Amino acid sequence: MKLSVVIVNYNVKYFLEQCLLSVVRATSRIETEILVVDNNSSDGSVEYIRQRFPAVHMIANKDNPGFSKANNQAIQIATGEYILILNPDTLVAEDTFDICIDFMNKHADAGALGVKMIDGKGNFLPESKRTLPTPEVAFYKMFGLAALFPQSHRFGQYHLSYLSKDETNPVDILSGAFMFFRKKVLDEIGYFDETFFMYGEDIDLSYRVLKAGYKNYYLADTTIIHYKGESTKKGSLNYVKVFYQAMIIFARKHFAASSAGSFSFLINLAVVFRALVTVVLNLLSSSYLILVDALISFGGIFYLIHLYASNIKNAPEYYPLQFIGIIIIPGYIIVWMLSAYFSGSYEKPYRVAPIFRGIVVGTVAIAALYGFLPEAWRFSRAIILLGGFCTGTVMLLTRLLYSLLRYQQFTFERVDNNRVIAVGSPLSTTRARAILQAAAPLSELVSEIDVSNKTADIQSSAAIFKTKEIIFCSEVLSYHQIIDQILRLGNSYDYKILNPGSDSLIGSNSKNNAGDLYAADVNLSLARPIAHRQKRLLDVLLCMVMLPVLPLLIFFVKGVSKFGANWVLVLWGGKTWIGYWETAPESIKGLPALRKAVIHQAAEYEDTQISTADVRKLNYLYAKHYSISDDLSVLIRNIRSLGK
């Protein structure tokens, strides 16, 4: 056996599918075995891949033993002369493995190699080449000197940024996303250290290659796509803890006691700093953000009103604190916050339009209510205007701060239009159109470029139609051609790939996010955060509407006591009025989570004999096409069943 490809998977079946399709193409001329280790995925990866790729050797773990141990499971039974450790969220070119094997054959000193990696937007990934993270190198990286002076041979060591990405060079550390080893070297130095659960194991193994007298090479002659971190979430305190703990394990293992102590000290400083940043980010990117906005807005409005009273009214005590500070300002802020919330201002990616819309609607609502306030409370319309301006400004600034801390850019993330171009054959682009209509109905396929037309110009078509997203159909395009096109077109566009036999479009819509996909079973209306907010609001409003007519409903619905219990549970948040039909765990598996429903979307057919598979289809359709109007329709048809 010439080559063994080892892939560890965790809940990324569509990315794994694309990865395997590219691996199969790249090994058409090479005797190869493909080993996939699944770490107890819950997305149906094992069954899906076994059916789609019967020749793949699947190892299905019943738990998640970590990246190192899972790789070792496969390496121990691999028979190839070369071992490739490959991430599931990668895509290789048809000639990638040929180029790697040829290089290894010509360089007897090479124990392992990595390749040039780009993300889904075509941006070069600097982790493609790294040096050993000594305490000095780690210090420059952690405290920003590496970013400030990338061309410095001293400060730019971490990512070897002073070396050209287009030149092959020996390097210290390879990325775990693509590590191409000689099997005999692994047998000599040992496999992955299972002390590392995740992160740091690639640094450790790369360093052991060097200590054994071999070289690690960064090979610039071939390029792969790595969608970056699709299997992990890096915005949590847990990630900070696990990642830096792995660095400490590495230092204690390989550095002298004094150096390891210095390294650990720096790491702990970095942990504290990153933890603080992460806490701030979590406050600015979760339900806490509405509280942050409200508190800062309260302080800002209070200050502006004081200035207004002192300088315009010439009466510092013009606005009584007992009304303004306790009733008026908090009341106004609640209206603005609710309006902004339901306009989508707290839904990522953060955008200016929902903030503006929310503040305008809230201001109009407050102005309309102003006339109904008691005369003693109607102090000045200036409070409304100043408050709206202040609240909107605060919401803009908190999101800009989030962007600065998260992405190191003081700007809102770009939100592209929904115009799409598909490149392929007429048959494949038609299939792309169908997937878009099913999974991303807001996207519009405006042009289909036939690759058989040699005069077709993708960039010109994108400019003419003002599109920002391009779909490449790999049924007629090679992955090498797709990668070349992405590199040529640059990061001004978003890219998706449609693979033969697949119902998903895979790519990366933002340099700030991991992989992204359109697939019929993941792009569901009910999966959107705003849909859950609307559903919860509908539940509460229905409870309020029912309250005045409860005496009538008690005589109308079946099961009076149960109806009362349901009403309380829905109001409290323990149930929802309308939701899934749950006949078995399989009937809702993989669908967006909902509270248990009082009635389901097919309640009138509850007594009909129907299979679990058909119930699941009904639940899927409900999640895919969810709307408030549909819920109201179900409620009206089945109002007598609210006591079930």
Image (spheres, helix red, strand yellow):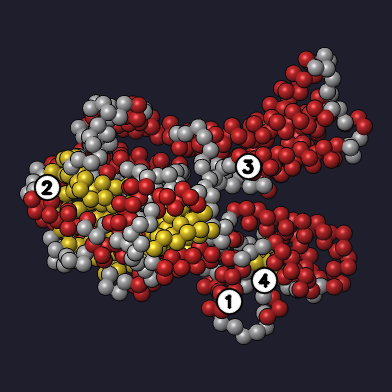
Q: Percent position (x, y) of residue 597? A: 66, 67
Q: Which residue is mark 2?
A: 110
Which residue reaches farthest right? 375
- Disc assigned to residue 240: none
Foreground mark, 2 or 1, reads 2
Q: Earlier in the sequence, mark 4 or mark 1?
A: 4
Mark 2–mark 1 Cα distance, whole angstroms, equals 56 Å
Quadrant housing residue 505: bottom left
Q: Quadrant of the N terminus?
A: bottom left
SS class, disc 2: strand
Q: Tell me the crowding category of disc 4: few under 14, some 14 to 19, or many 20 or more residues within 10 angstroms, Cα based.
A: many
User: What residue do we see at 77% from left, 56% from top?
Assistant: 541
SS class, disc 1: helix
Instruction: Report the side of 424 relative to 325 (left or right).
Output: left
Q: Is residue 302 visible?
A: yes
What amino acid type is highlighted by mark number 4?
His
Mark 4–mark 2 Cα distance, whole angstroms, equals 62 Å
Q: Which residue is mark 4?
A: 600
Mark 1–mark 3 Cα distance, whole angstroms, equals 39 Å
Q: Earlier in the sequence, mark 2 or mark 3?
A: 2
Q: Quick check: marks 1 and 3 in contact, CB under 8 Å?
A: no
Q: Percent position (x, y) of residue 583? A: 59, 76
Q: Which residue is mark 1?
A: 615
Mark 4–mark 1 Cα distance, whole angstroms, equals 11 Å
Q: Quick check: marks 3 and 4 in contact, CB under 8 Å?
A: no
Instruction: Report the side of 46 relative to 392 (left or right).
Output: left
Q: Tell me the crowding category of disc 3: few under 14, some 14 to 19, or many 20 or more residues within 10 angstroms, Cα based.
A: few
